[in-house]
């Protein structure tokens, strides 16, 4: 591996229009990667592209569009990436929301669950064949230490009972980690690694849809929180550093492995979450099987 391990590598970042995703994309571009900027709005995507170009000089930035509150948009997003890039080496599943009220999407799913978790499961599945064909390749799931306060709630994934903003958010981030562990096991030996990261408490726009009380708490905490580029550091490191070459199934903060909420290690729960997620994501169409799709791409 040369001094610039990301040079020439194709990296897809969801939610690259603001906060941690924007700074992750900038960090990857600064290291010479080809970066695909996930955006739900074309103008915001172009603004992110112009902003990153201005600070890094990179001309290798591409916008991919999709609203992750719609499963069919995730499919269009994936088709766009697969159509344009014969190789995909890194997928950063970052887009996320903290909602102030329970919203049900047109797919009939609770929005926090869908955007933060299920749409990324679907995207990962759709890109896995290409990631496999491009191995060694890496997936980074942006989780949160908020997951420590969450429960998977497998009997009520849509939180029809007792929805709160906090419960929905912490559950989605715990699901990100449980999915990371299960996927890592299924991808063993394929050259595709998957890890989760906690960026730290970061000053971004993520509380903008949250209830006023939650926004007030974050306004008070502002002097103590990290900049978005500091928050992106561990994610960029997991995406490209030789330090973690071949490492998989971990959860990281400040460039170090940490333990997660014990609930995420429960393998029976991971499998059940996998099966339930598969069924929900398949509402939008067939899903490539794991690891069969990856192995087939490597045959
Ligand atoms: N901030 C923190 O302290 C913190 C701590 C731990 C973990 N995290 C995690 O870090 C990740 C990024 O959050 P952030 O703090 O950077 O928040 P942010 O500034 O609000 O950025 C969120 C990104 O996700 C995108 N997004 C939201 N809804 C979407 C949808 N329906 N479809 C497609 N994209 C959508 C946003 O797009 P728009 O620009 O169009 O809104 C934006 O690019 C999240 O997964 C969050 O859970 C954050």
Image (cartoon, helix red, strand yellow):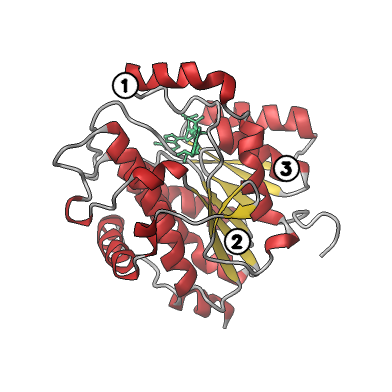
Using residue 201 as the reference point, say whether residue 33 is left or right of it.
right
Residue in the picture at 54% in, 75% down: 297
Is ligand 1 less than 8 Å from the beta carbon at label 1? no
Decide: few, some or many residues near mark 3? Use Cα within 10 Å; few <14, some 14-19, many ≥20. Answer: many
Sequence-wise, which precedes: disc 3 or disc 1? 3
Residue 100 vertical placement versus 238 (above, below): above
Q: CA distance from mark 3 to mark 2?
A: 16 Å
Decide if residue 224 is on the left or right side of residue 121. right
Q: Nearer the viewer, mark 3 or mark 2?
A: 2
Q: Which mark is in front, 3 or 1?
A: 1
Crowding at label 1, few (<14), some or many (≥20) Cα neighbours within 10 Å? some
Residue 73 lies, in percent from the top left, at 39, 45
Q: Is residue 147 visible?
A: yes
Residue shown at 62%/40% (left/top)?
232
Residue at which label 2 appears: 138
Q: Nearer the viewer, residue 241 or 130?
A: 241
Q: Residue furthest left?
A: 161
Provide residue 72's location: percent of width, then percent of height.
34, 48
* Residue under numbered circle 1: 211
Res. 70 visible in picture: no
At numbered mark 2, what does the secondary structure look like: helix, strand or loop?
strand
Asked if marks 3 and 1 touch (Cβ < 8 Å), the reply is no
Question: Residue 44 sits in which quadrant?
Answer: top right
How far apart are the alpha carbons under marks 3 and 1? 35 Å
Answer yes or no: disc 2 within 8 Å of ligand 1.
Answer: no
Residue at the spot of label 3: 29
Mark 2, Cα crowd under 10 Å, few <14 / some 14-19 / many 20+, is: many
Give the quadrant of the N terminus. bottom right
């Amino acid at each position: 591996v040369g001094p610039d391990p990301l040079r020439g590598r194709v990296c897809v970042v969801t939610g690259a229009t603001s906060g941690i995703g924007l700074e992750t994309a900038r960090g990857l571009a600064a290291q010479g990667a080809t970066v695909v900027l996930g955006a739900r709005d074309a103008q915001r995507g172009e603004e992110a592209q112009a902003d990153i170009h201005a600070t890094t000089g990179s001309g290798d930035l591409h916008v991919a569009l999709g609203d992750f509150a719609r499963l069919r948009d995730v499919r269009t997003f994936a088709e766009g990436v697969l159509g344009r890039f014969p190789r995909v080496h890194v997928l950063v599943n970052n887009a996320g929301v903290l909602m102030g009220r329970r919203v049900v999407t047109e797919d009939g799913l609770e929005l926090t669950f869908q955007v933060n978790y299920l749409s990324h499961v679907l995207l990962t599945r759709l890109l896995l064949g290409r990631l496999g064909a491009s191995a060694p390749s890496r997936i980074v799931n942006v989780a949160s230490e908020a997951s420590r306060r969450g429960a998977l709630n497998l009997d009520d994934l849509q939180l029809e009972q007792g929805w709160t903003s906090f419960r929905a958010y912490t559950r989605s981030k715990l699901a990100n980690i449980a999915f990371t562990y299960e996927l890592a096991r299924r991808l063993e030996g394929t050259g595709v690694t998957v890890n989760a990261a906690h960026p730290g408490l970061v000053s971004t726009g993520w509380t903008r849809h949250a209830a006023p009380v939650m926004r007030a708490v974050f306004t008070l905490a502002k002097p103590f929180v990290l900049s978005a580029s500091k928050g992106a550091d561990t994610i960029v490191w997991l995406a490209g550093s030789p330090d973690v070459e071949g490492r998989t199934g971990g959860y990281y903060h400040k460039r170090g492995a940490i333990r997660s909420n014990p609930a995420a290690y429960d393998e029976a729960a991971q499998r059940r979450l996998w099966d339930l997620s598969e069924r929900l994501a398949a509402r939008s169409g067939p899903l490539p099987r794991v690891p069969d799709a990856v192995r087939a791409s490597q045959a």
